[in-house]
Amino acid sequence: MADPRFFDRAGPFTLADLAARSGATVAPGADPALVLTDVASLDQAGEGQLSFLDNRKYVAAFQTSRAAACVVHPALADKAPAGMALLLSTKPYRSYALCAQAFYPFPASSGLISPAAHVDPTAVLAENVEVAAGAVIEAGAEIGPRTRIAANAAIGRNVRIGADSVIGACASLSHCLIGDRVVIYPGARIGQDGFGFAMDVTGHVRVPQMGRVIIEDDVEVGANSTIDRGAGPDTIIGRGTMIDNLVQIGHNVTLGAGCVIVAQSGISGSTKFDHHAVLAAQAGVAGHLSIGAGARIAAQSGVMRDVPPMTEVFGTPAQPKRQYFRQVAMMARLAKGKSGRGDEHDGNE
């Protein structure tokens, strides 16, 4: 159960309500009118609580769980303990996420503007915009309905933010157009100068960065991540893309719809990701490359050339999965052969 000091719970909901919200089906024999009051993990759930099973590793916990109801794949439904109501879903984690959103939705805007906020008279705020203390909204900015601006956020001149968005504490936005239902977490930096200069032994010459950042609808940008504005073309973040904390996205980068960019990764300027590509933690991508739709780049990989669609790459320089692991196995055999004794060799002979 979430700590009520920090999280406001909605509900209760019936099993049928949650099935409709999540795309799941009430299992035969379960009572659609069963009332559920919260969500919890398999090992902690109890009376009136909903849990989920998405990984076979936790079947044992599922079999002994005291949850009133559980979201589960139909193939595992026969493992449920007696008396547990089931919601059947071929994507149980997704269905559970939608149920959890029902109980714990994003807080609604209060519609209040703090007297300690600084809003330029020429800024346009739609109905029910919330602006917290210390936030700054500069001249010509436009903020859409029900959007929330947290404490000490800075919204630059002529920035546009759509409806139902959230701008976290101490985030800064400039030279950008933000869509609807966008969440920008605390400390994120959107629209600052891209890293562009002409290198010269007599002194590097800065190149003015004259583009923007375009963030489409339903995007999330994690805490302390940075997205540079374009040098001339725009930097574009496609609809539904999820960006983790501490990510660097360079100027002129284009991310297609539904991409996932994980913590501490970086994308150099002018690289293009097609839709639903994944960049895992601490991976780096060189500039001016093309990453195909559905491609997956493993953690700590270094990408130096284009990645075809639906390809998994590993290592530095990044290589296709099979080739990478073949080379790892070969290196292990070579190391073992050189010592003559493999892992038993201790170097003391």
Image (tube, grey):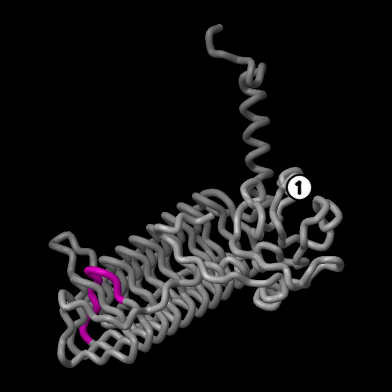
In the shown orientation, is residue 227 left or right of residue 201?
Answer: right
In the shown orientation, is residue 281 left or right of residue 58?
Answer: left
- Residue 72 is inside the magenta segment: no
**Residue at 72% in and 60% down:** 69
Q: Position of residue 225 (x, y in %)?
A: 36, 63
Helix, strand or loop status at disc 1: helix
Work out whether residue 49 or residue 198 is closer to the camera in this orientation and state it.
49
Q: Is residue 63 above or below residue 154?
A: above
Quarter of the image holding residue 30?
Answer: bottom right
* Residue indicated by mark 1: 59
Give the quarter of the figure containing the C terminus. top right
In the shown orientation, is residue 119 left or right of residue 23?
Answer: left
Give the quarter of the figure containing the N terminus. bottom right
- Residue 153 is inside the magenta segment: yes
| Magenta stretch, overall SS | loop
Q: Position of residue 200 (x, y in %)?
A: 19, 63
Quarter of the image holding residue 177?
Answer: bottom left
Residue extending farthest left: 202
**Residue at 18% in and 69% down:** 205
Residue type at tag 1: Val
Local crowd size for mark 1, using a 10 Å CA cut-off: few (<14), some (14–19), many (≥20): some
Circle count: 1
Q: In the rendered image, is residue 197 in sight?
A: no
Q: Position of residue 165 (x, y in %)?
A: 40, 79
Q: Position of residue 144 (x, y in %)?
A: 35, 88
Quarter of the image holding residue 29?
Answer: bottom right
**Residue at 71% in and 57% down:** 68
Magenta stretch? 149-157
Residue extending farthest top: 349
Q: Is residue 190 above or below residue 59?
A: below
Q: In the rendered image, is residue 30 in sight?
A: yes
Work out whether residue 39 or residue 208 is closer to the camera in this orientation and state it.
39
